[in-house]
Image (spheres, rainbow, N blue to C red):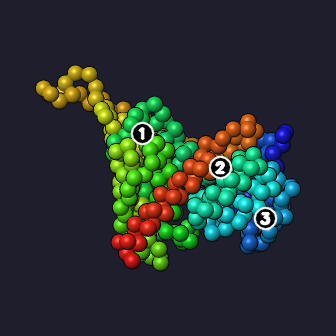
Amino acid sequence: MSVLRTAVIGVGYLGNFHAQKYAAIPDVELVGVVDSDQKRAAEIAAALGTTAYSDHRDLIGKVDAVSVVVPTQYHHTVARDFLAAGVHVLIEKPITVTTAEADELIALAEMHKVVFQVGHLERFNPVLVALGDILHEPLFIESVRIAPFKPRGTDVNVVLDLMIHDIDIIQHIVGSPVEHIDAVGAPVFTGEEDIANARIVFKNGCVANVTASRISLKSERKMRIFQRDAYITLDFQNRKLLVAQKGSGELFPGIPNVKVVERELGQADALKNEIESFIEAIREGKQPQVSGREGKMALETALKINVSLKRTHP
C-alpha cells in the first residue's frame, strides 16, 4: 500500500495526540476521528483537516488501520468490529476488561492476518531501549510509578491505570511465568484502589516489588533492577539510565571496585515511535513490538493482583 488510511477512535486527551501523530507522518492519511462527543470530534477534525464521525462503524471499508483510544470497557467491542473487517488495530492499554475478551481479539487478528498492537507506551521509552545487552537474568526488581490525582483514567483502578505499565516491562525483561502474587492497596479518592503494592514471584526465582499511586504530590517513574554483579536504575520520567557494576581490582581487601556509568538519553517522542512501529509492522508484515498476547499477559497479571487486593480488602 502506498498511502495508509488511518483513523483514531476516541479523541479525548490521549486520542488527540494519536490523531496528531498520524496526521504528521508521510504516506499516512488521517481519514477521520471518532468520538461520542460530537463537538469534540468536530474540533479535532477541523484542527487536523480530516472528517469527524460519531460511530466507528462508519469507517469500516474506509480505513486500513486505527488506534482505539476509548474507555477500557469499550475496547473489546470497538476493536472486534475493526479486526473482523480486516483492519489493523493499535489498542490502548489495558488490552480489554477480561482475558476472554483479549483472547477473542487475538484470535480475530490471527484469522484475518492483521497487526494487533497494544499501547504499552513505556516499551518505546529510550531508557528501556538503551537497556539492551546490559540486562542479564534479573534477580530482584523494584518499581515505583506515582502521580498526582487526575480524573481521567479513573474508570479502572490504579493497577490497570498505572501499574500495568511496569507489569508489562517486568514480564518482558524477566521472561518467566508468574508463580505467586501478594498485594495490598486502598481506595482514597475514588471507589477503586488509588494506591497499590504487589510482590510478584516468578518461576525462575526473580521477585518484583511493584508500587503504583495516582494520589501522590509528585510524579515519579523509576525501576531498579538487581542482577549478579550489577545494579541498574531506570528513570523513565527524566530519561536517565544508571548502571553500577563490579569493576576490576579491589576498593578494599575483599571489596571490589564499583564502576558507575550514568547516561542521559535526552528528549524522545515515545508515542510517535510507537505509532511508527505500528505502521512499520503493517507495511513489513511482521509482529508488532507489543503483541496482543503480551498485552493479554500483562492484563492477566494485573487481574491476579486485583484478586489479591480483594482478599486483603473484601
Packing grade of label 1 (10 A; few <14, some 14-19, many >=20) is: many
Among numbered discs 3 and 2, the one appearing first in the sequence: 3
Q: Check disc 2 and give the amino acid type.
A: Gln
In the figure, residue 18 lies in which quadrant?
Answer: bottom right
What residue does disc 2 label?
117
Q: Which residue is drawn at 72% across and 64% down?
A: 78
Above or below, 224 relative to 298: above
Residue 45 visible in the current orientation:
yes
**Residue closest to the eye, 37 or 285:** 285
Q: Residue at x 41, y 75 (%)?
A: 188
Closest to the camera, between mark 1 and mark 3, is 3
Q: Are marks 1 and 3 in contact (CB under 8 Å)?
A: no
Which mark is on residue 154? Answer: none
Three-letter amino acid code at the position of disc 1: Leu
Query: Tag 2's secondary structure?
Result: strand
Residue under label 3: 56
**Position of 189 relative to 24 (above/below):** below
Q: Residue 241 carries which label?
A: 1
Badge 3 amino acid? His
**Count of all numbered marks drawn on residues in the image:** 3
Query: Of tags 1 and 2, which is closer to the observer?
Result: 2
Question: In front here: 147 or 103?
Answer: 103
Looking at this view, name the residue that lies furthest to the left: 253
User: Residue 104: horizontal and vertical position, in percent?
Assistant: 67, 59
Q: Quadrant of residue 230?
A: top left
Residue at (45%, 48%) from the top-left corner? 177
The local secondary structure at tag 3 comes to: helix
Task: Answer left or right for 160 relative to 82.
Answer: left
Dot 2, how many residues are within 10 Å of its Cα: few (below 14), some (14-19), or many (20+)?
many
Cα distance in 3D space between marks 1 and 3? 41 Å
Rounded to the nearest whole Å, what is the CA distance between mark 1 and mark 2? 27 Å
